[in-house]
Image (cartoon, grey):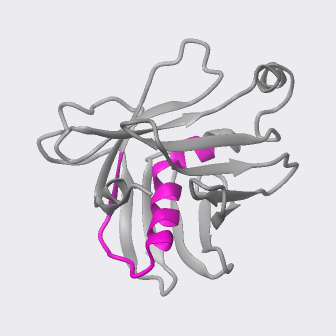
Amino acid sequence: MNSNFFDLKTYFIDEKVNIFKFKNCYKVFNDKGNEVGSVNQTLTSGEKALRLLLNKSMLPFLLEIKDVKGNILASISRGWTFYMSTIRIDDPKGNTIGTIKQKFKLLKPTFKIYNRSEELLAVITGDMKAWNFQINDSSDKQIGTISKKWNGPLKEVFTTADKYKVDLNTDFANDSNKIVILSSAITIDMVWRQSR
């Protein structure tokens, strides 16, 4: 597993333009503006056809987090769903290392993140309209933020509404727990879109 990617504390997520919008594709940059990876949604032809016929919030999805060499670092997936869904986070070997459970309150969704033992790791809450999220650990201490508004030298580079910044300001003794939280935060926009 590429630890360099998950060792970062700041990530800029930049959506790549997709003419047909069948799938979501994002590039991931560090705080110096260097590309460090990508997040891509994988779809079969059958899944593309179903997206034209059915509500996409019901459909399965698979998101892959990759480094700049194309190696899969983690994947996030969900099966068919008809109400509230549980999203699975897997390591590159396909082992489940965590889950995300969603709870929606109008424009204020809550994402609860659990480790492989179903212990609560973190909670992401926020305001979709303003696109401000807070990441709290299991003891309700703030450990990070997700935002489309920030200050700093890269502000002029990433200015449009389809870009956001993830900050995680803590270390974890268990690497897989950090990977689960970061994977959840980095893919928050895609998870939200697939659930609407």
- Residue 51 vs residue 31: left or right? right
Number of disc labels: 0
Residue 170 or residue 83, whichever sits in front: 170
Q: Residue 61 location, x and y as percent?
A: 71, 40
Whether residue 188 is in magenta: the answer is yes
Which residue appears at 65% of the width and 22% of the height? 22
Residue 66 or residue 148, whichever sits in front: 66
User: Is the N terminus in the top left, top right, bottom left or bottom right quadrant?
Assistant: bottom left
Q: Residue 65 location, x and y as percent?
A: 50, 45
Q: Quadrant of residue 162?
A: top left
Residue 133 or residue 25, whichever sits in front: 25
Q: Which residues are magenta?
A: 165-192
Whether residue 30 is in magenta: the answer is no
Q: Farthest residue toward the left?
A: 153
Q: Residue 159 location, x and y as percent?
A: 27, 31
Q: Can residue 150 be seen in this snapshot?
A: yes
Q: Farthest residue toward the top?
A: 19
Q: Quadrant of residue 172?
A: bottom left
Q: Can residue 99 be seen in this snapshot?
A: no
Residue 176 or residue 140, whichever sits in front: 176
Magenta stretch mostly in which secondary structure? helix
Which residue appears at 64% of the width and 32% of the height? 42
Q: Residue 29 location, x and y as percent?
A: 30, 41
Q: Relative to 95, is 58 above or below?
A: above
Q: Relative to 100, is 48 above or below?
A: above
- Residue 32 vs residue 115: left or right? left
User: Is the C terminus in the top left, top right, bottom left or bottom right quadrant?
Assistant: top right
- Residue 35 vs residue 163: left or right? left
- Residue 14 vs residue 185: left or right? left
Which residue appears at 62% of the width and 51% of the height? 76
Which residue appears at 70% of the width and 28% of the height? 43
